[in-house]
Image (cartoon, helix red, strand yellow):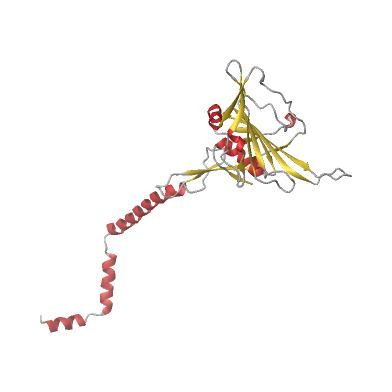
Amino acid sequence: MTNEKLYEVLGDINEKHINEARAYHRAKKPGWVKWGTMAACLCLMVVTAVSVLPNYLNQQGTIPLDNPNGVIVDNPTDDTMPATSEIHISMSNIVMNQISDSFNTDYARYNPETDIKVVWNREDIIAYYGTDLVPAYIPDGFSASGDNNKAIAYIGQDGSVVEDTVYLDFYKGEAAQNGIKQGFSITASKIGIVQTCYVLPEDKLKTSDIGGTTVAFGHRSVPNGPYDPDTHEPSGYYDMYVAEFEYNGIEYEIVAEQMEAEEVVKVVSSIIYGEEVFIDK
């Protein structure tokens, strides 16, 4: 057949017949092709789930079910970065007692005539207590007293420590308008604190749990002068907070003046956890 005859024959084919032929060819496509396509899609979905699911389960801000202390795990999506954690303390779990006006009996455990007085430096204090008594969190603007690096102790005739009390002060440089400095002090002792001005009423004492440590918090509105000469009323009041607890064999007492309750709880928690924590109101 010549080329001219072939073109004439092809030209006489109706376009409708061509479309029907194409449709028939698609309809006759083998079944394994269709199921193979579906299997490929399913495999793609599985691969995607495997890669995404771990990041979803370990997303930032998750709270482990086995953690009763409010530690929030922060797992980064980048596998090259280690997981971190944030410790959160809720103020709704903190109980404030009313500070008593009474005083503890002031007595000494040492005999200045027979016991040996020694001066500990910072290294001596850390060696004796087995830890640095400086809290992990100190509010901005607070400065450590120069006397924090030393303490006076007494050694008995048998070589044992009979007085080990350490005092640390952290205050702002200048006093507030009422003449009272803003800050806090820490009293610590392994033998036991025997001299304190602020105690909590034992018969009505309520405690709070911070990381498994029992802490007694107290609050008092303290009057300050000048006082009115006629009514003897104070010119104002300021907040005083006290926290008493024992941790790792060390007895602590913290007295804070003109500080927020959240900041006091944050200081206490940083001693217990050894790091800065987050306070949720």
Q: Give whichever of 9, 265 is nearer the camera.
A: 265
* Picture layout, residue 135 above or below residue 103: below
In this view, which residue lies farthest toward the top?
158
Please name the residue shown 60% across and 35% down the image: 148
101 sits to left or right of 47: right
Q: Which residue sits at x=17%, y=82%? A: 7
Where residue 25 sits, quadrant-wise, is bottom left
Image quadrant where residue 239 sits:
top right
Location of residue 79 with respect to 242 vertically, above or below: below
Count of numbered circles on the image: 0
Quadrant in which the N terminus appears: bottom left
Query: Residue 151 at what x, y percent from top left?
Result: 61, 30
Q: Residue at x 64, y 25 (%)?
A: 192
- Residue 99 versus residue 170: which sits nearer the camera? 170
Q: Nearer the viewer, residue 14 or 250?
A: 250
Q: Is residue 65 left or right of residue 10?
A: right
**Which residue is at a point 45% across and 44% down the rendered structure image?**
83
Residue 211 appears at what percent x and percent y? 58, 35
Q: Position of residue 256 (x, y in %)?
A: 68, 40
